[in-house]
Image (cartoon, grey):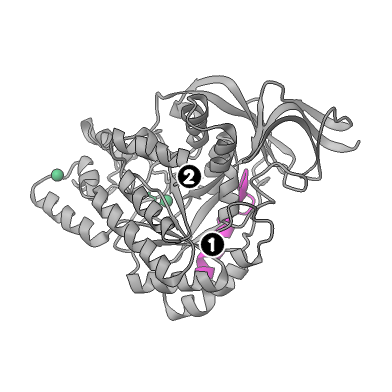
Amino acid sequence: SEFDLIVRGGTIATASDVFLADLGILDGRIVQIGENLTGAGRIIDASGKYVLPGGIDSHVHVAQPSGEGIVMADSFESGTLSALFGGNTTVMPFCLQEKGRPLREALTAYHALAQGNCYIDVSFHLIVSDASDALIGQELPALAADGYASFKVFMTYEDLRLSDADILKTLDVARETGATVMVHCENEDAIRFLIGRHERAGEVSPRAHASTRPVAVEREATHRALSLAEIVDVPIVIVHVSNGEAMEEIARARARGVKVIGETCPQYLMLTADDLDGMDWEGAKFVCSPPPRDKAAQEECWRGIETGVFDLFSSDHCPFRYADEQGKRNPRGLKSFRHIPNGIPGVETRLPILFSEGVMKGRIDLPRFVALAATNHAKTYGLYPQKGTIAIGSDADIAIWDPSESRTIRHVDLHDAADYSPYEGIAVTGWPTTVILGGRIMVDEGKLVGEKGAGAYRPAKPRQSRHNTNTMEI
Ligand code: URP
Ligand code: ZN
Ligand code: ZN
Ligand code: ZN
């Protein structure tokens, strides 16, 4: 027959259009978009459903070493399975450089962990933890040309933070190579000062995690990162933005002509610092950085999603088990919030939350949802138009959403390897019930039918070598 698969009668949405059509899929790609398509080995009836590009979550952590004895809950297998059930067909995890070691070495290890174990496609960001001359001068330029075209730098965490000098060097390599730099903006010296003050006062419960990382810590670092990018004259991504004051820094920098992409995450729409209170260390379930703020900040982040301060909506999935044999996300049994590993799970719930709270509640329309869920991630990180849209020639990565499917989020129904969801008990309307990866049906009406190993590594293109970047050119 003419096609391997036809998706028939659905409402298709891209980042710019919504229309009724059939999709014809052959050899893993979309080859026809039209009416009354026939001639396929398999036909999916999508009437009454939304047919959207598969989600791209460009900010997830799996199998990342996290310091003394702390193990991330998800492997590539469980992390990509969870992402798949949440309507995603590509994730972008981080490859962490070990201090004093070449990044290639870490990449070899991550590729070995991923190989044959992924349910969806994978592309990597590189975390620069040691801006040595060899890394800046030779390794990063070679890696950028080789499919690793985004670098994350940290302004916080004692073992990861870079000096402003090293951030400038990394930004400069990005300018030369067309790579994209993501920045974690929090002022480490200010945090350490506040941690000292809290510990001396005996304030050591999980709530103090939020108190020692106040808005000013993030706002100052955001301003500084944007200024450094302005000085180097290179685009920059500000990741996991939690509040309106950091958003104002982004808007102001944009007005000065800085090319900046903003990212926010479900935790900043759905959680507050009050969630870090709670009996018996329960607040540890919500420890992430920057911390969730307050109701007003949630509304500001929604405004940023609506107005375009944010182009990216990512999970920052960073799963640790809450209860293990050592107990309560405090693996060394130490009695202070500062030993709680930072990060929370959310790769499976990211899109259902944005769909339900955003589209169903009328805050954003379907094209904006698609942009935030998939298209802008592909454009920002060099995977477009192979990924992130429904177009002739693009990979047949498709999520079919049932807008009438109502669920209450329960961790027992999710597929990650953490032991809780920070969104337990939240009711959502709309769920991706069928997911197709490169023309292969992976989830069929809620049932896993695809196999581990179906997902492949996808190299990313640096900015200079991109052609069809369309409207969101950075
Ligand atoms: O707390 C967080 N966000 N953990 C994940 C690592 C990061 O900084 O993105
Ligand atoms: Zn970060
Ligand atoms: Zn305090
Ligand atoms: Zn992260």
Image quarter in which the N terminus is found: top right
Disc 1 residue lies near ligand 1 with CB under 8 A: no
Which residue is at the front of the view, 180 or 137?
180
Work out whether residue 189 can be spotted: yes
Q: Residue at x 55, y 57 (%)?
A: 124
How many marks the image carries: the answer is 2
Disc 2 residue lies near ligand 2 with CB under 8 A: no
- Specify whether 471 is left or right of 301: right
- Specify whether 103 is left or right of 188: right
What amino acid type is highlighted by mark number 1?
Ala
Instruction: State the image coordinates of residue 417 (x, y, percent, origin top left).
Output: 47, 39
Instruction: State the image coordinates of residue 308 (x, y, percent, origin top left).
Output: 48, 44
Query: Magenta segment: does it hold 18?
Result: no
User: From what the image shows, is residue 210 above or below residue 425?
Assistant: below
Work out whether residue 156 can be spotted: no
Q: Secondary structure at mark 1?
A: helix
Residue picked out by circle 2: 308
Q: Secondary structure at mark 2?
A: loop
What amino acid type is highlighted by mark number 2?
Gly
Residue picked out by circle 1: 109
Query: Magenta segment: does it hold 105?
Result: yes
The magenta-colored residue range is 103-123
